[in-house]
Image (cartoon, helix red, strand yellow):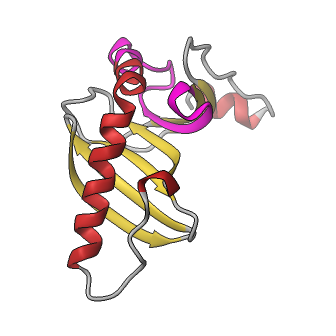
């Protein structure tokens, strides 16, 4: 029995790791483990949800560095994401009206273990309650998923 299972069995939980950027909330020990976290994201002036692929021990330095790069390059990434969303919507025979860039609200950042070489994502919602997941490889969008909230 793992230490975590033992602690849960006796009604205790291991506290989340302390981190300089991420406030870890809940750990998911799937085949690709990750932490659900929140973090202050200066380009939006508040906290966003962040899914951090990492072991229970917490984020690695590459994730911290990439998060800071993303803050610095967010407007570039937002512009690229918006263009990818518009391209995706233009190929659909029906669907939501194309959103204005300023209506996109960042709701989640997904960080892989080795960003930006591995796929990472930005998730947005717009004023029409449509959810957009935009996957990136490096700084270029690679796919878009559109779903109603």
Asked if residue 91 is positioned above or below residue 142 in the image, the reply reads below
Pick the quarter of the image with the N terminus: top right
Pick the quarter of the image with the C terminus: bottom right
Asked if residue 108 is positioned above or below residue 60 in the image, the reply reads below
On the image, the x and y values in percent for residue 29 come to 48, 39
On the image, the x and y values in percent for residue 14 come to 68, 23
Residue 10 is covered by the magenta coloring? no
Where are the magenta residues, as a range?
41-65
Asked if residue 149 is positioned above or below residue 76 in the image, the reply reads below
Residue 56 is covered by the magenta coloring? yes
Which residue sits at x=29%, y=65%? 86
On the image, the x and y values in percent for residue 42 come to 55, 25
In the image shown, does 83 or 92 lie closer to the viewer? 83
Is residue 27 visible in the rendered structure shown here? no
Is residue 84 visible in the rendered structure shown here? yes
Which residue sits at x=18%, y=31%? 117
In the drawing, does residue 18 fall left or right of residue 113? right
In the drawing, does residue 74 fall left or right of residue 137? right
Locate residue 87: give its quadrant: bottom left
In the image shown, does 5 or 93 lie closer to the viewer? 93
Q: Residue furthest bottom?
A: 93
Asked if residue 99 is positioned above or below residue 17 in the image, the reply reads below
């Amino acid at each position: 029995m793992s230490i975590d299972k033992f602690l849960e069995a006796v009604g205790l939980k291991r506290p989340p790791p302390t981190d300089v950027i991420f406030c870890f909330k809940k750990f998911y020990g799937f085949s690709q483990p990750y932490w659900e976290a929140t973090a202050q994201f200066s380009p939006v002036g508040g906290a966003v949800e962040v899914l951090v692929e990492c072991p229970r021990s917490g984020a690695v330095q590459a994730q911290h560095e990439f998060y800071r790069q993303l803050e610095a390059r967010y407007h570039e990434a937002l512009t690229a994401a918006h263009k990818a969303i518009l391209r995706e919507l233009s190929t659909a025979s029906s669907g939501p009206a194309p959103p204005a860039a300023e209506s996109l609200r960042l709701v989640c950042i997904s960080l892989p273990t080795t960003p930006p070489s591995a796929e990472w994502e930005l998730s947005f919602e717009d004023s029409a309650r449509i959810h957009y997941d935009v996957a990136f490889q490096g700084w270029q969008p690679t796919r878009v998923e559109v779903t109603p909230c």
